[in-house]
Image (cartoon, rainbow, N blue to C red):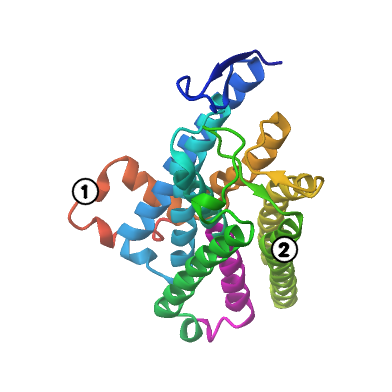
Amino acid sequence: MENLTVQYCFPDNNSSCRKEVRTGPAYIFLVIFFSCVSACTVFLNLLVIISISHFKQLHTPTNLLILSLAVADLLVGLIVMPVKTMELIDSCWYLGKVACIISEIITGLLMFASLCSLVFIAVDRYIAVNDPLLYSSRITVCKMSVCIVLGWSFSLFYNVIYFYFNDHLLPSQIYIRCYGECVVFLKHSWLVIDLVIFFLVPCSVIMVLYSIIFNVARRQAKAVRAVMNIVSQKVTSTSETKAAKSLGIVIFVYLACWIPYYVSSLSVEITSLTSLSVVWTVFTWLMFINSFVNPLIYAIFYPWFRQSAKYILTCRIVESSSSTFDLYREH
């Protein structure tokens, strides 16, 4: 499956790691595929960011959450994915210990910030469905901005603490077997903690809230059917079906992207974040691919995004009055 040409990362250093240039068909396919995913992730999330930032009609609390999610996912596609792709091609790390740990902290920060945004979106939708009359007074742009800042701050704090207790925060604490290696070993106890904080709790919150949202939507649909004619019943039934599919996609994609990594990470006592296994690489990239899928779920399904994307791609946003365009009028 692979053809390994053994070289050295730093030929002039006696303690240099061996350099593995992976040229097998499986690695070539993965590199091409991951490069395309990275480019698409940046492009889609950039469209979301430009849309929400430029058009005044989209300056709402909910869209602020989508903007925060898009920023985190954009940085995943712009920073994390290219670095991980290069690691897949070349096993050597040329930037030193400090850059190694900073790279891992940035990766954890962006992934956790993206996850926090997903949770906040679920909470926002729950409040909007259960208390629609008071939603505008309870959820404001200012309050949502504070929540976003707190989410990013907690993500950074958690990652610093996480690496500190794994003895990787300081360059002198980082254990390397040879010069030119960036391998972060995690204690099994902290893998369990990470599983709870980074997966089980957010997963439970998202699933419970979306289940409640769907049940409330079903009750509302039944109430409408009770007073509407048979034609309206068919329309309501269709809307209910679309809502069910949307929520099902959200939950399925979230679980599909995160479960494989955590199940595999708990199978060993001490785990390396940069394992050379093809299977491990695929499981890790599934989490990154979630950043590619997020704009598809949370933005492309919205008519306003399709309309704003059309304005952006046709360069109509350069018009002086483009920020005040009505993105909902045609829908």
Q: Residue at x 61, y 56 (%)?
A: 167
Instruction: Relative to 65, say whether 127 is above or below.
Output: below
Q: Is residue 320 left or right of residue 176?
A: left
Name the mark on residue 318: 1
The extreme front residue here reads 14
Name the mark on residue 193: 2
Query: Three-letter amino acid code at disc 2?
Result: Ile
Is disc 2 placed on a helix, strand or loop? Answer: helix
> CA–CA distance between discs 1 and 2?
49 Å
Instruction: Relative to 246, say whether 14 is above or below.
Output: above
Q: Residues in magenta?
A: 113-135
**Is residue 299 at all visible to an observer of this figure?**
no
Decide which of 99, 250 is in the foreground and name it: 99
Instruction: Relative to 154, say whether 166 is above or below.
Output: above
Is disc 1 placed on a helix, strand or loop? Answer: helix
The extreme right residue here reads 267
Decide which of 115, 223 is in the foreground and name it: 115
As for residue 290 lying within the magenta part, the answer is no
As for residue 121 lying within the magenta part, the answer is yes
**Is residue 196 at all visible to an observer of this figure?**
yes
Q: Quadrant of the C terminus?
A: bottom left
Q: Residue 273 in the image: state x and y as whole percent.
A: 64, 43
Q: Residue 61 in the image: state x and y as whole percent.
A: 45, 72
- Sequence-wise, which precedes: disc 1 or disc 2? 2
